[in-house]
């Protein structure tokens, strides 16, 4: 009985307690950790991961999974950069086109999963490699930056404008713009998931697809929309990344895939939700961001960070599945 209560307590409050312990530890270890500037940097750094993870959250809600979000983000990043540097496109096009590209990737994934019937993991794994190949072919294997030499001769005619870079580097009332965008998106998705009919349909589809179908829910359409939204959020993450670093970096999204997935699974247990949810995803991203920031201050070698990310993911999965097993026992 005591063991079950301990597991239940860890499931509900373990992530929050760990977040508090980590904050206290790094604050005592380094006096510069818990300062406005550093906390601001942490929030700025997790903004892209959070937005990417929100897309994964949508697919997990419908009992799916999207492994292609990292490659989709990379594609969005280089498309964004190329529109500015190669084609000198207006700012509106620079924002809209990468979002549409992300939506098309989501549509492609849903076609494989919903229409053809390929399992989610296998379909999005295949899509991940296809998209990675597409964005590398598109850029001919180069990152995109101001005044870059072109293979056709000469240099690129355009450059990243200050108005675009402001999206990733600017501030409003002392708060980084990416943080404001992240918080607005988290709040909007929370309202959609928990206070609209469409949000309830998403959770119904993921909870029991057959029962949802018998209730009249058009489950295939719901799944399609979940994957399209996943692609859109990956597209938004790519735009924000390009605006933050001021270039279209190759494979920008690949290192963030594991962080996004870990954030979502940590979020399962935040306040005992027991399901994918956007508030939990935000807390999960915050936990990972704080850990990486604090370990950087401790001068831990960068190549050891993968161990930390993997450990957080395994711990989150272990707590979630142990709780699930006890619940259904």
Image (cartoon, grey):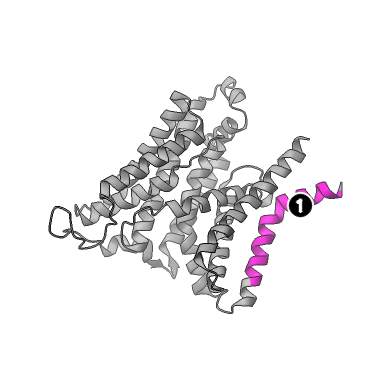
Mark 1 surroundings within 10 Å by alpha-carbon count, few (fewer than 14), some (14 through 19), many (20 or more): some
In the picture, residue 106 is in which quadrant? top left
Magenta residues, as a range? 2-25
**Horizontal side of residue 154 vs 211, given as left or right:** left
In the picture, residue 309 is in which quadrant? bottom right
Q: Quadrant of the C terminus?
A: top right
Residue 12, magenta (yes or no): yes
Dominant secondary structure of the residues highlighted in magenta in the image: helix
> Could you tell me residue 232's position as x and y percent?
40, 43
> Could you tell me residue 224's position as x and y percent?
45, 31
In the picture, residue 326 is in which quadrant? top right
**Horizontal side of residue 166 vs 124, given as left or right:** left
> Could you tell me residue 73's position as x and y percent?
39, 49
Residue 35, magenta (yes or no): no
Residue drawn at the location 43% of the way across and 51% of the way down: 254
> Could you tell me residue 261's position as x and y percent?
54, 48
Identify the element where label 1 is drawn.
Answer: helix
Depicted 64 relative to depicted 233: above or below = above
* Total number of numbered discs in the rendering: 1
Please give the residue where the numbered disc 1 appears in the rendered image.
Answer: 9
Residue drawn at the location 56% of the way across and 38% of the way down: 61
The answer, for residue 184, to whether it is visible in the render is no
């Amino acid at each position: 009985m005591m063991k079950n209560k301990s597991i239940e307590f860890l499931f509900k409050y373990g992530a929050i307690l760990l977040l508090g312990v980590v904050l206290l530890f790094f604050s005592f270890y380094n006096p510069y950790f818990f300062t406005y500037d550093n906390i601001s940097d942490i929030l700025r750094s997790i903004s892209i991961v959070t937005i990417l993870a929100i897309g994964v959250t949508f697919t997990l809600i419908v009992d799916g999974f999207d492994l292609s979000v990292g490659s989709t983000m990379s594609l969005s990043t280089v498309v964004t950069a190329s529109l500015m540097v190669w084609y000198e496109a207006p700012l509106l096009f620079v924002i809209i086109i990468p979002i549409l590209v992300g939506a098309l990737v989501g549509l492609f994934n849903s076609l494989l999963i919903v229409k053809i019937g390929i399992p989610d993991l296998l379909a999005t794994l295949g899509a991940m490699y296809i998209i990675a190949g597409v964005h590398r072919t598109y850029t001919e294997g180069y990152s995109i930056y101001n005044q870059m030499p072109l293979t056709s001769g000469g240099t690129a005619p355009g450059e990243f404008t200050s108005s675009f870079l402001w999206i990733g580097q600017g501030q409003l009332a002392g708060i980084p713009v990416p943080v404001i965008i992240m918080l607005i998106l988290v709040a909007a998705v929370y309202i959609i998931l928990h206070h609209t009919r469409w949000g309830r349909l998403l959770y119904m589809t993921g909870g029991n697809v057959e029962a949802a179908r018998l209730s009249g829910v058009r489950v295939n359409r719901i799944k399609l929309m979940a994957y399209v939204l996943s692609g859109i959020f990956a597209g938004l993450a790519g735009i924000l990344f390009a605006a933050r670093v001021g270039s279209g970096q190759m494979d920008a999204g690949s290192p963030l895939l594991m962080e996004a997935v870990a954030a979502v699974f940590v979020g399962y247990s935040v306040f005992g939700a027991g399901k994918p949810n956007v508030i939990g995803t935000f807390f999960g991203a915050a936990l990972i961001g704080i850990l990486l920031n604090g370990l950087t201050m401790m001068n831990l070698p960068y190549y050891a960070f993968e161990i930390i990310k993997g450990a957080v993911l395994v711990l989150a999965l272990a707590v979630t599945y142990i709780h699930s097993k006890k619940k259904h026992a």
